[in-house]
Image (spheres, rainbow, N blue to C red):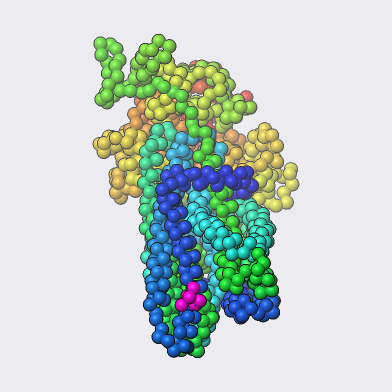
Amino acid sequence: MLKKLASYIREYKAPSIATPICMIFEVLFEILIPLLMASIVDDGIGKGDLPHIYKVGALMILLAVLGLISGLLGGVFAAKAATGFAKNLRKGMFDRIQTFSFGNIDHFSTSSLITRLTTDVSNIQNAYQMILRMCFRAPFSMILAMTAAFIISPKVASIYLVAVIFLSIILFTIMRSAMKYFSSVFKKYDELNMTVQENVGAIRVVKSFVREEYEKSRFKKASDNIYHMFQQAEKRVILNGPVMMLTVYSCILIISWVGAHIIVQSGGTTLATGDLMSLLTYCMNILMSLMMISMIFVMVSMSIASAERICEVLDEEADIVNPEDPVFEVKDGSIVFEDVDFSYDREGKGEPVLKDVSLSIKSGETIGILGGTGSAKTSLVNLISRLYDVTQGSVKVGGVDVREYDLKVLRDEVSVVLQKNVLFSGSILDNLRWGKEDATEEECMEACRLACADEFIEKMPEKYETKIEQGGSNVSGGQKQRLCIARALIKKPKVLILDDSTSAVDTATDAKIRKAFREAIPGTTKIIIAQRISSVQDADHIIVMDNGRVNGFGTHDELLKDNAIYREVYESQTSGNGDFDEPR
Amino acid sequence: MGPKPKLDHPERILARVFSYVFKSYLLHVIIVAVCIVTNVLCSIRGTLFLRTLIDGYIDPMLKASLAGEEVVYDGLLQAIFTVAGFYLIGVIANYLQGRLMINVCQGTLNNLRKELFSKMQRLPIRYFDTHAHGDIMSIYTNDIDTLRQMISQSMPQILNSAITIVSVFISMIILSPVLTGVTIFMVVLMLFATGKAAGGSSRYFVKQQKELGALNGFIEEMMEGQKVVKVFNHEEINIKKFDELNENLCESSRKANQYVNILGPINAQLGNLSFVLCAVVGGILALALDPASALSITVGDLASFLTFNKSFNMPINQVSQQFNAIVMALAGADRIFKLLDEEPEPDEGYVTLVNAKEEKGKLAETEERTGLWAWKHYHKADDTTTYVKLQGDVVFDGVDFGYTEEKTVLHDIKLFAKPGQKIAFVGSTGAGKTTITNLINRFYDIQDGKIRYDGININKIKKDDLRHSLGIVLQETHLFTGTVRENIRYGRLEATDEEVEAAAKLANAHGFISRLPEGYDTELTGDGASLSQGQRQLLSIARAAIADPPVLILDEATSSIDTRTEKLVQEGMDRLMKGRTTFVIAHRLSTVRNSDCIMVLEAGRIIERGSHEELMEEKGKYYHLYTGLQGA
């Protein structure tokens, strides 16, 4: 997994390597400077040697400048490497997602893809910067200080060794038990967020049932839960400080005692007084580095989850790809289904959604599809533009299997208006031009006329330049559907599929749109999925779907005569249970 | 997170954060402060010991040893034990501080969260209609989180540093004013560098936040519309646009991080420079100057001063590292306080709903649940209280309304509904049907005219009681996480299991609920994602049924559910409407036809009204809508 992620460092390898090197130099100066400081105090001030102070002072300034340079470079490189790495990761994921088929998209939820692209990447960016800056620095600093201590006095330095081992065991234990609590804190956080989200979304329900107090008590419970969990986790984390201090202080005192004995007994030959001071300075250095390492450990293990989630996206193989030698032309709008079985399960296991479907649709026909929820209407039409691949059998458009076409060509010629459709932020024209990038204003207006969208667009203050808000929240459901139809029409496709795309458009306008289709684009095969019988009854043929199978195929009159489901739907809708007007 | 505006009064926000912390945790904070002071003093005592260790003990002992005298370690042992005592106190203080800070930090955040939520519950619907839900959410997540870091880390750090700085400063002044001057000069230089770097970083941080917002917005939009992207072959164009945004973010984020990263090294080296300067100047003062001069210092003092110089620079460096965290936290705190400062939904109503019983033909208030309800109306003018039976008689009289002052969307709405009557609203999208229903339960307040409920102006009725007397079934169903039973019981919390089942039966929901794996105890999550649209509607009908209100507001569902389920929904709705005053935004022929009165709305006005037969006679807009022909 780490290897996979690391491959995205790419052009930022140089700063990624330069950062730790700069850091190592910085540490080097950091260790040297205290030595010079000690020399100033002991040899210069202690002996009243002013020139020595000048000399060492100048050297120290030189080292400080060098330290500054390596520190600055380290900071600059680290920022460059970490943000660049994050950029590459984001791009890698985004590009990968663009190749995803509908099946791949279904596999991840929208919100999880968003989190992966945003929060998870930031986590990795922070962790990476931390690793570059600290991962070499801290151990190096520790080793350096340890080495220096051993050179000065192996006997005293062995005290550090014991302290380091003791402290690492304790820190590790503390962090491990805290991590356990932290991960449940995050889970509780999700619950809390869910409560808030639910409430904000359903605020009308809350208010109309006067449930504010009830919701408050629910929230209080969730919030208190987090409070207690956090307390548990942090109770453990705060032990770090005192344990650390205790160790440092113990070391200082033991060294003072032991050091004093060694100095006195050896008469200052094995260990000089100045050396003792240096040893004490290194003590801080070693144990602080250890603290740093334990922090890196926590941070990295917290970002492991993010790394895993990112890799899942990067590893996902697109399951619909262009064929090797694709066909670039769709001859006409005829559609043939031959013994099609289809299942959403990728291995073709599980209950098939479509069973044994065989159909033949002539180019230019208008086809209605009717059926209850879950009868696989949408699944059926999704196979035509190869949004999913059949499990068995084949689907042919213009006489050629859809799997042989170039994907882009096929999807330009087979235009689908999805059931769950979205508009994007930008002007109405921008949105329409999704269908065809270089469409002229006239083409756009013509498409809107066909989709009966012109009437309301003309009434808007800025007409075709009107800005659509994110998700199309400033147009009504019916208006949105009509814009989506217009957008699909601009492609001038050979096959047009409307998947329940006029459910929010009133019956009269719905009829008008269908009339316009008949007159303006007679050569285009039109497939209309609808719940309203009025939307399909004048089609050339109507397909009645039931539980994944074609239950009936014929004209309105034929089906009325010999299809039970069709008759039932027809009767229920005409006997006073139909729609009155447009539903919002 | 959207673009971050510049903070207006950071000091005021900071003061408010502090006052918030002190409000509930004053004692804690005081003890923490004492702990920090203790800790600092103990560590200073420790530093002093290290100085005397050599001069006071080892050197004399070494001399004694070299002179062949007997070496006595007792003094050293005693000194070590004394210092150990101080260290121990320091460790205990440190632990206590950490332990108490958890309570202060988490407790404050917990309070803040709860206060935010209960404030949010009291905000008018307008707030939710005009604020992006994502922005509200991010207050609970991002903003609270940055505040946590500030309270738990930055605040104690600053307090600690401040105490260290002050105590060290005093010691320095005593030792040598001249050297203190040199040190201060370098500190000013450090602060200047910090200010420069921090200024640069906060400029780029703002830019980074803005570009992050732009990129995240794009990502969100494209992930939502990923299927549309596929259908329109828009992948290439998307990638191009994404690359541009991604590149921008990377650039500003790089600069922001760069500034933060270099702050540490700059200050550290300036600190070293300060040390050298003091050593040189001090050396001159101590060695080259006449010992009688006032400025002269001893060699021992200089050594001590240099130690202090180091301990003075360190906390300044630490505080400057916290700068960005504080700026971010204050921006978050600003958003939190903005929500807390929002004007809550006003409620000046005083007429309340009470249980009533009939005594000698007159209504009287009672404690027990009688099934009979009355409006308790206190008249200030003559100090009397009257009781009006809750019946569900609603009158609109010349009502004007607009969501904003400038734009009126409803004009001169007049209508009346006798108890038990069914009023249907029909008309095209944007005609104002939903808006009217928003006024009865006072989600929005009218600008002109009057709405009366059982003869009482609804402005006089307490909002909670008004809403208790109204049931509502929205087209967009919202269910909550919890069991099916809990969701139905939402309508009336004290309902028994039998009542829940009865309501489900009335709403035609019992059938599908019994077929769920765990029946009424099936857990629903994510707004009832596991249920079909029709099933969710059935549940929301049951939820309204159990509340049993005299007046109902219904927004009929569209036809995007299949015929069989829709039949169940219709039956459920019809049973629910029976015997209640109902306002229905109608989409079904049968509902419209069976209504007592149909209001045809267009552009915020009622253009036609009457029964189905009457309106068909008129051959107006209704006739056209009904026959499916295009209106004139």
Q: Residue at x 36, y 46 (%)?
A: A221
Q: Is residue A51 above or below residue B289?
A: below
Magenta span main SS: helix
Give the image location of residue B278, x and y in percent.
Answer: 65, 69
Q: Is residue B56 magenta?
A: yes
Give the image location of residue A467, x and y in percent.
Answer: 66, 42
Residue A431 appears in the figure: yes
Left or right, B448 with respect to B563, comes to right
Q: In the depicted view, which residue is nearer to us: B36 or B498?
A: B36
Give the image location of residue B210, x and y in percent.
Answer: 63, 52
Give the image location of residue B78, x and y in percent.
Answer: 38, 73
Q: Residue at x 38, y 56 (%)?
A: A231
Q: Which corner quadrant holds the C terminus of chain B?
A: top right
Left or right, A327 with respect to A560, comes to right
Q: How many marks?
A: 0
Q: In the depicted view, which residue is nearer to us: B149 or B227?
A: B149
Q: Is residue A18 magenta?
A: no
Q: Is residue A55 above or below residue B197?
A: below
Q: In the depicted view, which residue is nearer to us: B25 or A357?
A: B25
Q: Which range is magenta? A: B52-57
Q: Residue at x 42, y 81 (%)?
A: A258
Residue B230 appears in the figure: no
Q: Residue at x 42, y 53 (%)?
A: B31
Quarter-of-image position of residue B65 = bottom left
